[in-house]
């Protein structure tokens, strides 16, 4: 299967590939680029819903700060195709060890009914942000409802920022956003108001605390202007910070025995892997948010590239072992 294929008809699939990459976000495309440049036959199957799709720009990415998320990925797809990698739109439903072939191979099933074989899998399917269940909140996600100060903090600097408390890290998040604005309000929402040292920290940084459950968001002319509490009072805001629970999107790996596990940080559930992205299932690597919940675009791309190099090395080892066996057999 080794070789470079220049694909112009992107949807015609081969029977088998050295590597099938599931997910064509920053991690998957970065891995595919490395593999295609390593002269591996590589297929990327991508459902086309990257996590940062609602955002207007990718921030903090050296050399590309502010680039539209869709444009970054379009460039990535072009780069992968430029080296003979194949990128197709679609969803992978399951992946399983190939019962007919070498035990190291997999059958990858697509939602449209097609299937392909792969010697190795790189799974970069990202995660699902489980947002707090407040009416109107989901529609503002990635616009003025935010989670990550490194992604959006600069854009909301000096604005009135509310922090919606839904977990134990809410005080930390409020203290972080205080770095970008002096007008931060801690909304206790469904949590008990902070006490003791945490209350002292918020007070010392000038962060006001508002008790009571947030019932809805106030939006005027497509801009957040505040939140309404259950008792009817309103709090004026320009941005609302939330902490979604982050859960790896990994249903397709269940048949291989890989299921999301609680991340030690308490941020959500991920697919565990070693530092190179190698999972406990031989031949399956993961990269990006599916394993590293905190990875931003740069870290996700780096994870994909690092995993790709390991996969290529693993294939080199296998190719060499097979070649030696053939020589010894007199071929
Ligand atoms: C609102 C918001 C704004 C952000 N802003 C920034 C920012 O400014 N800067 C920054 O560095 N980071 C930002 N991030 C973080 C950024 O989104 C992630 O770091 C990045 O998307 C992780 O890349 P990934 O490749 O791991 O996953 P993703 O980008 O989520 O890509 C995963 C891909 O896999 C596909 N997929 C999933 N399941 C399947 C399947 N079964 N079959 C085929 N394809 C599948 C998905 O459709 C998707 O295209 C932001 C995040 C959010 C939520």
Image (cartoon, rainbow, N blue to C red):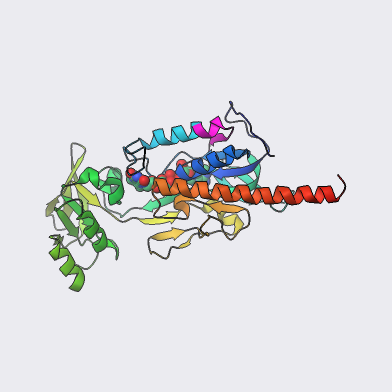
Q: Is residue 130 visible?
A: yes
Does residue 31 lie above or below 170 as drawn? above
Q: Quadrant of residue 39?
A: top right
Q: Which of 276/239 is in front?
A: 276
- Residue 161: give x, y in percent of width and height: 18, 51
Q: Which segment is the magenta one?
A: 79-90
Residue at the (62%, 45%) spot, across then down? 108
Q: Which of 268/328 is in front?
A: 328
Q: Which of 185/120 is in front?
A: 120
Q: Residue furthest bottom?
A: 196
Residue at the (41%, 55%) spot, across then down? 293
Q: Is residue 105 visible?
A: no
Going by the image, does 274 lie left or right of 17? left
- Residue 76: give x, y in percent of width and height: 47, 35
Q: Quadrant of residue 74?
A: top left
Residue at the (45%, 32%) spot, across then down? 75
- Residue 206: give x, y in percent of width and height: 12, 60
Task: Please check the rendered image and state whether residue 88 is part of the magenta-colored stretch, yes or no.
Answer: yes
Q: Quadrant of the C terminus?
A: top right
Q: Which of 320/281 is in front?
A: 320
Task: Please check the rendered image and state whether residue 241 is part of the magenta-colored stretch, yes or no.
Answer: no
Q: Quadrant of the N terminus?
A: top right
């Amino acid at each position: 299967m080794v070789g470079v294929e220049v694909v112009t008809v992107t949807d015609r699939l081969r029977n088998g590939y050295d590597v099938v990459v599931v997910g064509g976000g920053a991690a998957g495309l970065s891995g595919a680029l490395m593999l295609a440049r390593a002269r591996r036959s590589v297929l990327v199957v991508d459902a086309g819903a990257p996590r940062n799709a609602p955002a207007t720009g990718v921030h903090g990415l050296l050399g590309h700060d502010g680039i539209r998320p869709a444009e970054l990925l379009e460039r990535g797809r072009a780069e992968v195709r430029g080296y003979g990698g194949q990128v197709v739109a679609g969803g992978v439903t399951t992946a399983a060890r190939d019962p007919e072939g070498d035990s190291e191979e997999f059958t990858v099933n697509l939602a449209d009914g097609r299937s392909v074989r792969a010697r190795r899998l790189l799974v970069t399917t990202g995660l699902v942000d489980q947002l707090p269940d407040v009416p109107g909140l989901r529609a503002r996600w990635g616009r003025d409802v935010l989670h990550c100060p490194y992604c959006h903090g600069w854009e909301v600097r000096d604005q009135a920022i509310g922090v919606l408390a839904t977990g134990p890290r809410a005080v930390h998040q409020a203290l972080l956003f205080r770095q970008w604005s002096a007008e931060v309000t801690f909304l206790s929402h469904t949590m008990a108001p902070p006490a003791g040292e945490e209350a002292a920290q918020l007070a010392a940084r000038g962060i006001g605390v508002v008790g009571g459950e947030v019932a809805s968001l106030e939006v005027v002319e497509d801009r957040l202007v505040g939140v309404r509490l259950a008792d009817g009072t309103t709090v004026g805001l320009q941005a609302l910070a939330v902490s979604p629970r982050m859960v790896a999107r990994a249903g397709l790996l269940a048949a291989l025995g890989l299921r999301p596990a609680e991340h030690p940080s308490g941020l959500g559930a991920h697919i565990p892997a070693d530092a190179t992205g190698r999972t406990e299932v031989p031949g399956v690597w993961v990269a990006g948010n599916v394993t590293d919940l905190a990875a931003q675009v740069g870290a996700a791309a780096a994870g994909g590239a690092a995993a790709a190099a390991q996969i290529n090395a693993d294939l080199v080892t296998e190719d060499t072992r097979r070649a030696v066996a053939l020589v010894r057999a007199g071929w």
